[in-house]
Every structure is written in structure tokens, then in C-alpha cells.
Image (spheres, grey):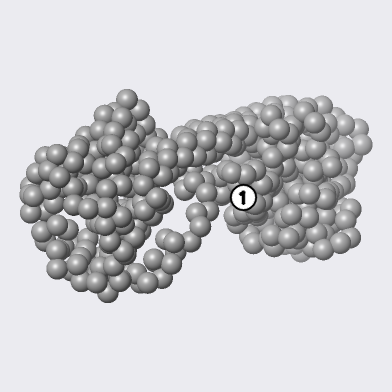
Amino acid sequence: MTSTMTATIRSSTAMAESLTGLKVQARELGMNLSAWDRDGQNVLLFEPQCEFCKAFSVIGGRCVDAMEALARSVVVQNEPVIGASPLGCCLLGVPVRQRRRLYGAVTACFPVLEMLEEETFARLCDRLHLDRRAAEGTARQSCRHSVRSAGDFLRVLDLMLRHWQEIHNAQDELASLSDNLTGTYEGISLLYRISSSMWVNQSPADFVRNICQELLHVMKMDTAAAVVYAHPPAVDRDIVVSAGAPVDEGLIRNLANMRIAPTLDRNGRAALDNKFGQRVDDELAGAVKNWIAMPLMTEEGLTGMLIGINKGREGFDSPDLKLISSIGNQASVFLSNNWLYADLHGLLMGVLHALTESIDAKDPYTCGHSRRVALISRRLAEVCQFPPAKVEQIYLAGLLHDIGKIGVPEHVLRKEGRLTEEEYEAVKRHPDLSARILGGIRQLEHVIPAILSHHERPDGQGYPQRLPRARIPVEGLIVGLADSFDAMTSDRTYRAALPLEVAIQEIRSHAGTQFDPDLAEKLLSLDLGAFLKELRSPPGGAAPVLFEQEKMR
């Protein structure tokens, strides 16, 4: 179907809808109404209303043909016309215009009093083979107006037509305004939801996946997709996500990199192509009929794009461009901040790892101890099914748990024999020293309780405060168990590493006194042999950690 035919059908349908109320009102005046488009096609059917018309037009009528001819005359002359039907009814025709454009004509007919004149009526009944007496009663009830009033009725019909057109136009404008307001509201709501979800420390993949799902709902297209190019350390490799009707990832990459990227200008403006499927002849032709795209720009240039695929027959429009542009700008801000956060986070974690390794380096036998305690603590927290933010807090507490040993004399840390009471007291001060060292860093305040209590015991015999079990944070119990497990399975100045079986027995026998029994059971439920190999493997870089922002999630 051509676009011209589609437009004609649409305008004819709109014309018929706008005249439905007019048809009802005309019936109350005793007129039968019909409507015709510019080509003479009937778009509002002639339906006889009065008993006279129902009887006479069906038998001998040709009334419809007469109305069609009158409608064509109205369209040609582009002005109101008065005529007569073969039965003698009065015919009226007025043009239908919209913003000075002629769309067709409305015709109306009604039986007139002149048809009841004795000779005229007799000839009509003879011609239609009707019983004159039976037909006369019906005719007298229906013929209420004279042909002399045709001009007045024509003006009334024209006024009524304009009135109903105005009502229909107002309804259309109201519906359009409502749709626009709904679209604007949905767009604003979408921007608000995206802005509210812009946690700089969340995964870029999760962020753009959420955007795709939101765009899919608001823009009412088949598929929403996003491509984010690799940007270590924040994004190790390209991200390709989509929502809605499935599209192969390779096709999305091809569409983004080979077809869309070359068309985007350097100013970072959105673009669309509603005839894409008609112009390509490769594998994309069957999957992509039209598309809209917004580049994601940072200071470093193009970092990805948002893509909408396949939106109805009409395709994407200006409101869609505005919406995806706004969303794309928000996403670009998020990515820029996320890149910066990842760089700063990597720097901070590198500094913290270097600091803890420098502490461990004071004693060759404890080299890597802080990293291993952090990894064991994190694994235990995961087994406890803590939220991700809490898991990473516990990891950080394990990493920094011994930082206070910087204040313990080196000869004490390296002593091979039994510590004197004075030396042991110096070692027991390291949790307090750790808390004081980290106390000035706001972002680390939430890990201090675990560091301060990692040598407390459920039986109340720990240090530095000899806390009862009820007052020991679970984070401290986790780090304490991880600390002891690594100490038992590592070489120390005063002994060699214990065999794994012996370490397991030690943990089991001290569960409830030195170690929390539930945590001990969770640790022993792991494949500790494989876990030890993992702990002894070379580190793969600073592990991620979440700071204060996650508490708000």
C-alpha cells in the first residue's frame, strides 16, 4: 500500500469519525445524512431514518446515486449545492474543509410537503406500484418541510457541519495534548529514575541495561540496545546489552560500529534513519527496519552509544530524538564519573595494598598475610550471604586489620621465641593503633569496629577490651577467624605451617571459645584445600571495594 493510499484512508476515517455526531443531530431534523470523500467514495453510509424513506427509497430509490452525483458536484464547485432525488426529495450538499483543504462533501436529503400534492403523490405511487391509501399515512408523518425551506436547511447543515468539525478538532487536539503530556511525563519520570540510579560505583553494564529497559517502555520500540567501549579499569572489555525483542550481539556491534558510528557528527548529537531497512541488502536488512542512536561522549571522545531499533511503520520522530538525547547526556555523565571513580578507587586501593604490604614486609614470614586475610574474610562474608557492600567492607577490614603493627617494634614482630609479657602487651596494642591511624579517614570509619575487635573472643578472653560475645561485631569475628586460619596455615618465625588437617582440628576444637561456632562451621564447609591454593596464587591486582556511597543503596 502506497503512502498516498494510506493517507487517503486515514483522512477518510477521520472525516467519518468527525461527522458521526452530525448524523445523529441531522436525524432529529428529519434529514438523512451521508458523506463522501474527494474521489466520490462513500465514507459515511446513507441510512434511511424516517418510515417514508425506508419504504420508498428501497423500492424505487436510486437516492444514493443521486447523493453521490450531488457530492461530486459539491467537490467540483467547492460550494454548497441544492438538488432533488428521483423521488422528489430535497437534496443538500456542503463541502467538508479542514484548514482550507477540501476533503469531500456531506449530503443530506429529506422528503418535502410538495410530494404530498394529490397528482404528484398519485404518480409516485403508480410508478412504484404502491397502494395510495396505505402509503399516504406514512408520507404525511414524514414530509414536514417545504422545498422553499431548502436554503435555510442548507445554511443550518453548513453551520452544524462546522460545529461538529470544531468539536472533533478540539477532541483531537485534546487527545494530542494528552498524549504529549503523557509522553513528557514519562520522559521526565524516566530522567528522574535514571538520575536517581546514577550511583557512580555501580557496574556500567547494570546502568546501561537499566536504561535500555526504561527506553523500551517509554519509546515503545521493539529493541533498545547499548554499546559501551572498553575503558580499563572501569570496563575491561566492550559491553553490549539489549532489552526487548532479541537481536544478536554481533548484529548490534555491526550496526553500531559499521553503520551508525560513521553517521554521527563530532558534536555528539542524536541521529535516526527510518528507511534503513529499505537501503541495506545484508543481514541487517531483515533485523533492522529503522533505528535511532545517541552517542555517549566523554572528554576522551566516543565511549559508546544508545540505540533504539524498529519502531512501528512511522518510525522515530523528533520527541524520540529529544528523549534519547537527554538520556544519552545523563549516561555520558555517569560514564565520565564512573571512569574517574574507577581511576581514583584503583589509586586508593593501590596505596592501601602497598601500605599493608609494607607492614607485612617488616616480617618476611608474614608477607602477603593481610591480602590473604582479606580474601578469607570476603569468602566467609559471601558464605554468610551478606549484601555486596558489606562483603567488601569486611574485605577492607581484613586488608587493614594489622596496620597498627607499624607501631610495634620490629624485633618483637620477628622474635622467634616466646614473647615476654611486656612484648605481648606491645603486640596487643596494635588493634587500638590501627583504629587511631584510620580514625581520621571518613570513608574508612565503618571498617574500624571490625579492625578494633578482630582479636576479641566469644568466651570474653580476647583483647584489647575483653568484650563478651554479644558486643563483638560479626565483622570482627570474621576477620579474627580469617586471621587465625591464615596464621595456622602459614610459616611463622616460631613454627612451620600446620598441615591443613591439623588446622581444621584446631578450629573445630576452639569453636565456641576462640572462634564463633557458626562462622567456624561455615569456614570448614569450604573446599579448604583448593582455597589454600587460590590464596597462595600470585595476586591479580587490587581487589575492588565499595565505600560510603553503598550504604545509601
Residue at 32% in and 64% down: 497
The extreme right residue here reads: 76
- Label 1: few (<14), some or many (≥20) within 10 Å? few
Residue 328 pos. (x, y %)? 64, 36
Q: Nearer the viewer, residue 347 or 228?
A: 347
Please identify the quarter of the rendering in which residue 409 is found.
top left
Q: Is residue 503 shown above or below 126?
A: below
Q: Amino acid at mark 1?
A: Asp
| Residue ID at (13%, 51%) | 457
Identified at 66% across, 51% down, the residue is 238
Whether residue 52 is situated above or below residue 149 in the rendered picture: below
Which image quadrant for residue 493? bottom left
Q: Is residue 131 left or right of residue 456?
A: right
Residue to which mark 1 is pinned = 236
Q: Is residue 296 above or below residue 363?
A: above
Could you tell me which residue is drawn at 67 percent across and 32 percent down?
298
> Is 123 on the left or on the right of 492, as rendered?
right
Farthest residue to the bottom: give it.
501
In terms of image quadrants, where is residue 11? top right
The x and y percentages for residue 222 are 65, 54
Give residue 421's position: percent from left, percent from top: 12, 43
Q: Could you tell me if residue 47 is visible in this image?
A: yes
Q: Position of residue 320 (x, y in %)?
A: 67, 38
Q: Is residue 210 left or right of residue 502?
A: right
Tell me the element at label 1. loop
In which quadrant is the N terminus drawn? bottom right
Q: How many marks?
A: 1
